[in-house]
Image (tube, helix red, strand yellow):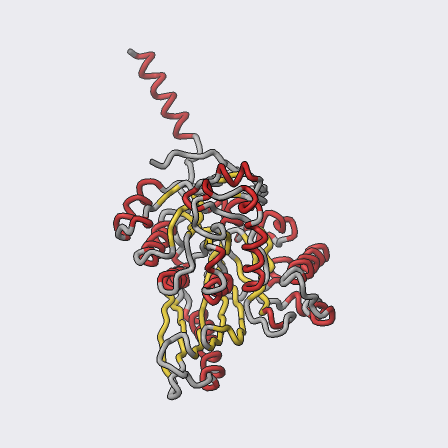
């Protein structure tokens, strides 16, 4: 008996000496943001939607809201007369996107998007990143210092990425050069996210009569060696948080997709939208808003038809057809696809040239269930690295997305796009391969989700 007791004591001592497994940092007080909007109508019936934030620091709140209010005051009076009473007729949306990284840094992108008959007619942006512990503004110089190689890498990526938009159009070399001068690089608009630094450029800077945003995305693992010590600490999110990706299928839908986008704007969450290709032309303004709001836009096949009844030749032709619609709308092709119903075997056997993204947590919102029932499932099943399946064509999904984002934050998660989820572990999405999740360390093992 004495030997057993001694062994038990030794075991308890050993266990107590082991490092505790991190459950993930909950949402930091300095990262908490309230984001809401108010609509006003001009005498000519045009509409101004102005977003305003409340942050943990009064100085940050005043500066960001001041930028947004200034855009509204400058651009709102010049909106053209509305020819009918619909909110889509003539409007200005001054939106505030926000995102967090590390334990103290918070980014904001203020976007002034003018719209007439759903056509985007102009877009202006201003970004800010702050240390929310001190209130100090964070610049690209604070992130990269005076590392010559870092700035050369940045310039090369900007040139490569921006020139790839609208592949049939060559951007003006002089205008592209102007975006790559030392001063332009240091003062470029950028935001920091869960696993990426994103540079933002209105397309009109390089491409005539195009007003969507162009993004240059740099994933933290590929730029970590270029970063200053403080920047490395504030972007080491794998050290602080668990991760998951919130995804949406079957859209766009004029009402429900718009509501989901509003919910994500409120919560600061970024998602991935798997869009049905033959809906892109008729709902181009929603696909543009998905892109402009910082979400990843992907394919959900050309139609929602059962691929098992579709010929291999038709399936193989699908990427080109989808990407033609996407390039016309947002300037770039999609990078991956989700098969309707998850019926991927026929896509693989046909040799369709896409990585195929499945899911590891089905919310069952497609059944039209309540947000409370969706959350019951999420609370029971959510794990690190999960890809969460939702549908932005369902009425309850906007509220479900809002609740999932808030719950995940409080449980120590940071929400990533599909691209970020795999990039965090250096996983390259490969054509013809099927992916269900990506846990810490690049764990791709499929898990049961009954």
Nearest to the observer: residue 16 or residue 409: 409
Q: Position of residue 134 (x, y in %)?
A: 48, 63
In the rendered image, residue 69, in percent from the top left (x then y), is placed at 44, 78
Is residue 153 among the parts visible in the rendering? Answer: yes
Residue 134 visible in the picture: no
Residue in view at x 38 percent, y 21 percent: 10
The residue at 45%/82% (across/down) is 76
* Quadrant into which the C terminus falls: top left
Specify the quadrant of the image occupied by residue 433: top right
Q: Nearer the viewer, residue 163 or 439?
A: 163
- 314 vs 287: above or below: above
The residue closer to the viewer here, 142 or 355, is 355
- Whether residue 359 sits left or right of residue 217 in the image: it is left
Q: Image point 47% across, 77% down: which residue? A: 116
User: Residue 93 at what x, y percent from top left?
Assistant: 44, 74
Q: In the rendered view, tell whether residue 140 sits above or below residue 42.
A: above
Q: Residue at image x 61%, y 49%?
A: 224
Q: Nearer the viewer, residue 374 or 38?
A: 374
Q: Quadrant of the N terminus?
A: top left
């Amino acid at each position: 008996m004495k030997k057993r007791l001694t062994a038990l004591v030794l075991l308890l001592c050993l266990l107590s000496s082991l490092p505790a497994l991190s459950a993930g940092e909950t949402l930091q007080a300095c990262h908490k943001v309230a984001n809401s909007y108010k609509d006003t109508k001009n005498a000519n019936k045009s509409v101004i939607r102005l977003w305003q934030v409340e942050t943990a620091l009064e100085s940050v709140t005043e500066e960001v809201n001041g930028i947004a209010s200034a855009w509204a005051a400058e651009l709102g009076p010049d909106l053209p007369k509305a020819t009918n009473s619909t909110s889509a007729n003539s409007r200005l949306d001054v939106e505030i996107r926000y995102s967090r990284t590390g334990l103290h840094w918070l980014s904001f992108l203020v976007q002034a998007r003018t719209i007439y008959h759903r056509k985007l007619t102009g877009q202006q942006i201003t970004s800010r990143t702050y240390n929310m512990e001190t209130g100090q503004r964070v610049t690209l110089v604070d992130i990269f210092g005076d590392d010559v190689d870092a700035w050369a890498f940045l310039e090369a990526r900007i040139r490569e990425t921006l020139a790839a938009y609208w592949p049939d159009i060559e951007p003006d070399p002089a205008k592209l050069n102007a975006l790559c001068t030392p001063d332009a690089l240091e003062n470029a608009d950028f935001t920091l996210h869960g696993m990426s630094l994103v540079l933002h450029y209105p397309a009109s800077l390089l491409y005539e009569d195009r007003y969507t945003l162009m993004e240059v995305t740099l994933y933290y693992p590929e730029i970590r060696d270029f970063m200053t010590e403080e920047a490395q600490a504030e972007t080491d999110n794998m050290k602080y948080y668990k991760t998951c990706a919130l995804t949406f299928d079957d859209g766009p839908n004029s009402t429900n997709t718009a509501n989901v986008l509003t919910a994500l704007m409120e919560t600061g969450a970024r998602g991935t939208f798997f869009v049905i290709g033959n809906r892109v032309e008729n709902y181009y303004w929603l696909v543009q808003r998905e892109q402009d709001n910082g979400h990843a836009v992907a394919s959900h096949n050309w139609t929602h038809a059962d691929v098992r009844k579709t010929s291999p030749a038709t399936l193989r032709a699908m990427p080109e057809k989808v990407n033609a619609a996407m390039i016309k709308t947002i300037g770039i092709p999609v990078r991956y696809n989700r098969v309707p119903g998850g019926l991927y075997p026929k896509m693989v056997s046909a040799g369709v040239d896409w990585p195929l993204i499945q899911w590891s947590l089905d919310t069952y919102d497609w059944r039209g269930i309540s947000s409370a029932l969706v959350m019951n499932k999420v609370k029971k099943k959510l794990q690190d690295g999960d890809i969460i399946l939702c549908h932005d064509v369902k009425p309850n999904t906007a509220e479900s997305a809002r609740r999932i984002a808030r719950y995940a934050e409080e449980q120590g998660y940071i929400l990533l796009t599909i691209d970020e989820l795999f990039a965090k572990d250096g996983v390259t999405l490969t054509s013809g391969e099927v992916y269900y999740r990506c846990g810490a360390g690049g764990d791709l093992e499929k898990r049961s989700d009954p």
